[in-house]
Amino acid sequence: MNSLKLLANFAGLCLLVACSNNEISPDKIEPSSNKPNIVIFYVDDLGWGDLSSYGATAVQTPNVDALANNGIRFTDAHSSAATCTPSRYSLLTGEHAFRKNVRILKGDAAMVIAPEQPTLPKMLQTEGYKTAVVGKWHLGLGDGVTPINWNKNVTPGPLEIGFDYSFLLPATGDRVPSVYLENHNVLNLTPNDPLFVDYTKKIGNRPTGYEHPELLRQGADSQHNKTIINGISRIGWMQGGKSAEWVDEDFPFVTTQKANDFISKNKSQPFFLFFSFHDIHVPRLPNKMFEGATNMGVRGDAIVQMDWITGQVVNHLKKLDMLENTLIIFTSDNGAVLTDGYNDNALTRIGEHLPNGPYSGGKYSILEGGTRVPFIVHYPNKVKQGLSHALFSQIDLYASIAALLNINLKNNEAIDSVNHLGPLFDAALPARTTLAEETPHTEGLRSGNWKYIRPVKKVNSWIKANKNIDSGLAKSPQLFNLISDPAEEHNLAQQYPNIVKELEQQLKLIEQKRTRN
């Protein structure tokens, strides 16, 4: 890039830094007088390049592609973090997870969203919406004071933060308890076989992966080799609860049915459905009807399964004549990862498929592949279809939906969420000028085409060694121009120290923010 272009970019950067606290894009979309239904499909570990609408050829995703073809497909949209719990927290609260030090949780961790905290579903309830979450939760349960008693009402949970109905995998598929939680109660649990969970020591007499590896359908690392459920060892130990155990291969049918039942029961009023997929998170155990759907093994087949589930819910909306007035957001909680605790051959069978597209890193990484994810908006009554290159964050869904419904947010509500309703519905409109990204180890900042990564005192080599992903961590500042270097291979920090200084200052201003204004 020549010096004139760089100077122009820097001048623009200074202007962006100066006005970033009042960052509002042109919004030509009027608030809706007819409240739309809202469905968020939140896929787990789906990378930017994992859909055929984003260029994948080794796997076909026709149902998701149909949403993209009739809506807006974003190329530069981001989860707020490169791991799942922080991303979910930010989407539902409109607040960066680093403000509460939210990290990936154990399966028996306390809920990280306080019952008194403003949330997206709470806001929608005030407007007469019925609200539901179906699928993976991983935001904790209980108050953290009293240990969770899985044999009684498990509370607080989703119902205490704005959801009228919840049907959950309490944490993730690779963590115990491996049971469904419907509203406050474990489903199908019997009194004569009570359920107990421990993350510090073995309890009960169930076999474990480290004691009986011969019983495993997939080999596992030392973190994932505890209690065996359905032939898969999990993180943590589980005792009892045999009647309540899930079967991983049933996830697509069980969760789809629960989602469609909720839609049917609430078709006469506006509703919000947060469909939080387990796919394509480990352990990857797609149902037999999807086996061999790709040549990439279980990970590729799980993508096809995810696409089928999406189609089932969309077709149900269509059958009930509700699709036209339903705002659908399809996206992912972070970038892709191939090896994440189990030996399921995802890495060896990947072939030429690029799960994170042209971007480096992936889940756990501060590089673009960590947070740049698929993001599709489908709403026939409003959306002007097309391809959007706007810089967009999932954290802005809160304020944008509030604007759609003409709701004024309080000063302490969703403090990091910015109204970008315009670009949600019109692919030609711009969105953010700056965007913060986070991992458990450091933070980064996008400003236009610049990407800044904070230095760390110690580079964590565990991510590369165990997840086969470049963490993006370094002991010195990093600066990349994503137009000329989308793979973030050429560090320009020493060449442009003033830009580094400005971006670090802007990141500090974001961290110091305490109210919406």
Image (cartoon, grey):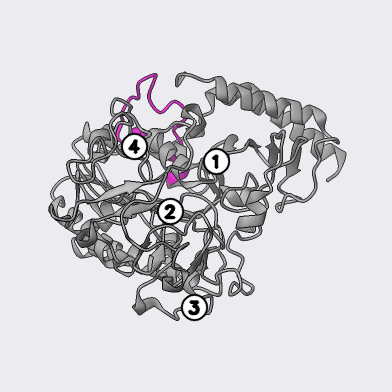
In magenta stretch: residue 7: no
Q: Which residues are magenta?
A: 401-424
Q: Which residue is mark 2?
A: 235
Left of 337 or right of it: where is 455?
Answer: right
Could you say which is closer to the camera, residue 35 or residue 247? 247
Q: Quadrant of residue 20?
A: top right
2 and 1 marks in contact (CB < 8 Å) = no
Q: Give the mark, 2 or 4, whose residue is nearer the N terminus.
A: 2
Mark 2 vs mark 1, foreground winner is: 2
Q: Which residue is mark 4?
A: 404
* Circle 4: residue type: Leu
Q: Give the mark, 2 or 3, whose residue is nearer the N terminus.
A: 2
Q: Which residue is mark 3?
A: 294
Q: Give the mark, 2 or 1, whose residue is nearer the N terminus.
A: 2
Mark 4 vs mark 3, foreground winner is: 3
Which structural element holds mark 2?
loop
Mark 2 vs mark 3, foreground winner is: 2
Mark 2 vs mark 4, foreground winner is: 2
Which structural element holds mark 3?
loop
Name the residue rendered at 59%, 59% in the picture. 356
Report whether residue 317 is seen.
Answer: no
Could you say which is closer to the camera, residue 377 or residue 350? 350
Q: Position of residue 132 (x, y in %)?
A: 24, 46
Q: Give the mark, 4 or 3, whose residue is nearer the N terminus.
A: 3
Q: Residues within 10 Å of mark 2 (few under 14, many from 20)?
A: many
* Circle 3: residue type: Thr
Q: Give the mark, 1 or 3, whose residue is nearer the N terminus.
A: 3
